[in-house]
Image: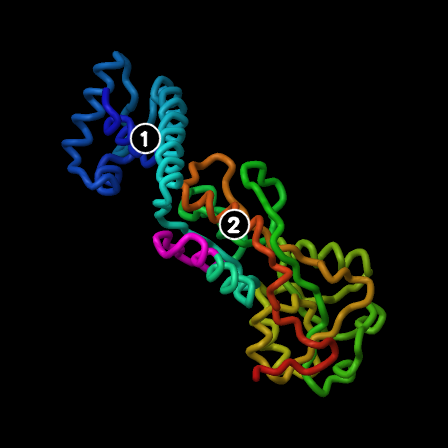
Amino acid sequence: MNLSQLYYFKKLAELQHYTRAAKELYITQPTLSDAISSLEKELGLPLFQRDGRSIKLTPHGAEFYEYVRASLRQLDEGVAAMEARKGDLHGLVNLGMIFTVQDDYLPALLRAYQAEFGSNVSIEIHQAFTNYLTQNLHNETLDLAFCGKRENEPDIAYFPVLNRPLELCVRSGHPLSRRSSVTFDDLRGMRLITYRRGIPIGEQVQKLLEEAALEGVVQNYDDDISMASVISIDGGTGALMLNSVGIKLFSDITMIPIEGVPRDFYWVYLACSKKHYKSGAVRSFIDFVKRFDSDDVDFGHWPEGRPVSTS
């Protein structure tokens, strides 16, 4: 039994398809088949069984996989630790994010990280919504993600990073546009839109609407820019939305604080899987985010009750 056989077994166990596993391992399918056959012969137990055109783990194979996965993870962590000790940190971090963090925070964070660790660590950015990012943390497509916090995710670790206020967005010239703040009573009877149910921010806004007994709000939207686009065209509609970077694209809208809604209404988290292996590069990024002083960053909050300027 050798190390290559264990890596081959782990990959095949996860994909349960010889052709795909061989392709991702950069070996031929016969080489993979021979390695698995030798491993089964040495153990004296079948690890896989046919399942139509695919394969699946036998009960023995499933048990062995847990040992192999844990052992290889520990080995990889040891190698990464030794590389870090000699100042040779390198690798790739697949980082997902919601649009909300693409303001001054992320560029400042990445600049500071590169200044400390150099350019040997590459960071690939993937933008999507929270639900999709969370799925990709589970399937290991992503290492980390800046996103909202989903309920009932025991295998995901969340570290709070920054927050955004929920405010009323109206077009400049709207009767409320010169107000320094509004109340929920001011909003009753007004045509309003906000985030859809089923995403973290949408569920949080829904609870707020129920507490305020505010009815008739259209909950169809995934993001701030879509709502800001509607407000920019329709001067009679208002949006309950986060005051975030996307608003900088529109010079004819106004953000107004809502009385009784906390300024830290919505938190963005750095999320990662508790179960999956993390390379030295990924662990260094997590540690850096946790100690990054975001108080030194201007997040681009604009004066309340004033039109937003893109200049």
Question: From the viewer's perspective, is 281 left or right of 16?
Answer: right
> Residue 15's quadrant in the figure?
top left
Q: Residue at x 74, y 66 (%)?
A: 216
Image coordinates of residue 264 in percent, x first then y, are 71, 59
Pick the residue in front: 13 or 158.
Answer: 158
The span picked out in magenta is 113-128
Magenta includes 115?
Answer: yes
Q: Residues within 10 Å of mark 2 (few under 14, many from 20)?
A: some
- Could you tell me if residue 197 is visible in this image? no
User: Where residue 83 is drawn, which disc sits there?
Assistant: none
Q: Nearer the viewer, mark 1 or mark 2?
A: 2
Q: Is residue 15 above or below residue 165?
A: above
The residue sitting at the top extreme is 44
Between 45 and 270, the residue placed more toward the observer is 270
Would you say residue 197 sits in the magenta stretch? no
Q: Residue 159 location, x and y as percent?
A: 60, 46
Vertical relation: 6 (above or below) 310:
above
Q: Is residue 262 left or right of residue 199?
A: right
- Within-10-Å neighbours for mark 1: few <14, some 14–19, many 20+: some
Q: Quadrant of residue 171?
A: bottom right
Regarding residue 201, the answer to whether it shows in the image is yes
Left or right placement of residue 290 versus residue 95 in this view: right
Q: Amino acid at mark 1?
A: Lys
Look at 36% across and 56% down and name the residue there: 119
Q: Under tag 1, what secondary structure?
A: helix
Q: How many numbered marks, from 0 up?
A: 2
Which residue position is annotated with label 2? 288
Type of amino acid under label 2: Phe
Residue drawn at x 78%, y 62% is 261
Which residue position is annotated with label 1?
10
